[in-house]
Amino acid sequence: MTTRETTRLADLCDLIVERVKPGERPDSLYLGLEHLASGRLIRLGGGLASEMRSSTSAFKPSDVLYGKLRPYLDKAVLADQEGVCTTELLVLRAKADVDPRFLAAVVHSPHFLEYAVSGTTGVQHPRTSWAHIREFGAPSFSYDEQRQIADLLWLVHEAINCSEALVKEADALKRAAMQTLFTHGLRGETQKETEIGPIPESWDVVQLGTLGKIGNGSTPRKATSEYWTGGTYPWLTSAKVYDRNIVEADQFVTEFALAKCHLPCIKPGAVLIAITGQGKTLGHCAVLCIEATINQHLAYIQVDTTAAHPSFVRGYLETQYDFFRQVGTSGGSTKGALTCAFLRGFSLPLPPTLNEQDEIVTILDTIDRKINLHRRKCAVLNDLFKALLHKLMTDEIRVGDLGPPVLEPVDLYERTS
């Protein structure tokens, strides 16, 4: 493969500076950094210019809007219509012999990201600048080659967007299914009003504490090597609740730690719930499928499996995520946490038979498998996009080397212009 000439970013595009004062274009689309997602080529949404109280920059369809603030966030999109944007976005307009989609790919390439970050100034609000990024050098491609590269990258990007949309739809389906299943059941029964809302006539409302022991754990002192060195007993943190079914541990403690520290030995079938956290973790829960112990940021419910299916309990607790977060971060706790006492008194609906619980769990598990399938597809497509972006933009591979595409290319630039 022959060595290509190098071209600068300034040879591919021009910086457009057209300031718009507040109120000049009140009905225009407004884009801020919050409307751009890291590593994505199209915007997430938008606002109205009338909401802005500071000057903005005008842009046109096919302009590339590049985030100069914290460039490591990798934010840049191809504009699909005209509008105004925050001055933290540089408006880059492709030259006549440059495909705008290709330009958008250039500023997302790993080498460009590294180059942009190397030229930042400021500590609390690091920014790069046009004076710096305009000198970025990349392999020179003909217009036809640019279009071929853009076709492939945007095809994969569109597939990612479709997969993410399917995940959102499946999540919405699950929420709707949960609402129906936990209020109507599966037997077509009449409903009765209870303290937690309508439930099937034959169901009971029980307190979580009646279904098994509830407690939390601790973190052995890290400086005490006897607690950690050579440890073989699984020790879990609140990050594991995202697994939903916990089948392995990332950290381990010793038998000495189990004997000396406040560490419960929790059996498979327990439900774990994150009881602290300022982010999204608080309120998430999972079923423990191994024997393990936990830290102080988790609580466990050692479910009596003769009375309740652990996955049924987890399923209902998942419907209460927003409520748990409200309790844990407001008046329900002085430390931004759920307490074991609160969990013991928490009420939930319970079908009279394990069979009905199992049937509900089966339905939810089927939806979960579909969601996980779409998420795995998204992960694969994201990895593919990143690999193609790097190798195509550095000329390590060429589109012609990859063979014919499975799908027809999606030209989003032409479609949205």
Image (cartoon, rainbow, N blue to C red):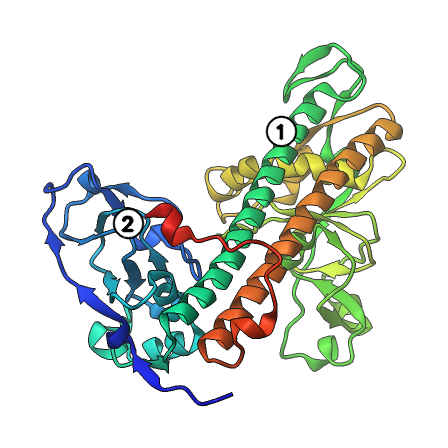
Percent coordinates x, y for residue 48 in the rendering: 24, 40
- Find the residue positioned furthest to the top: 190
Residue that badge 1 annotates = 176
Percent coordinates x, y for residue 252 in the rendering: 74, 71
Percent coordinates x, y for residue 195 in the rendering: 63, 19
Amino acid, disc 1:
Ala
Identified at 29% across, 59% down, the residue is 65
Residue 72 horizontal side relative to residue 310, left or right: left
Identified at 33% across, 76% down, the residue is 116
Whether residue 16 appears in this view of the structure is: yes
Q: Nearer the viewer, residue 77 or 50?
A: 77
Mark 1 vs mark 2, foreground winner is: 2
Above or below: residue 350 compared with residue 39? above
Q: Nearer the viewer, residue 116 or 284?
A: 116
Residue that badge 2 annotates = 31
Say which mark, if any, is on residue 255: none
Identified at 72% across, 61% down, the residue is 262
> Dot 1 lies on which element?
helix
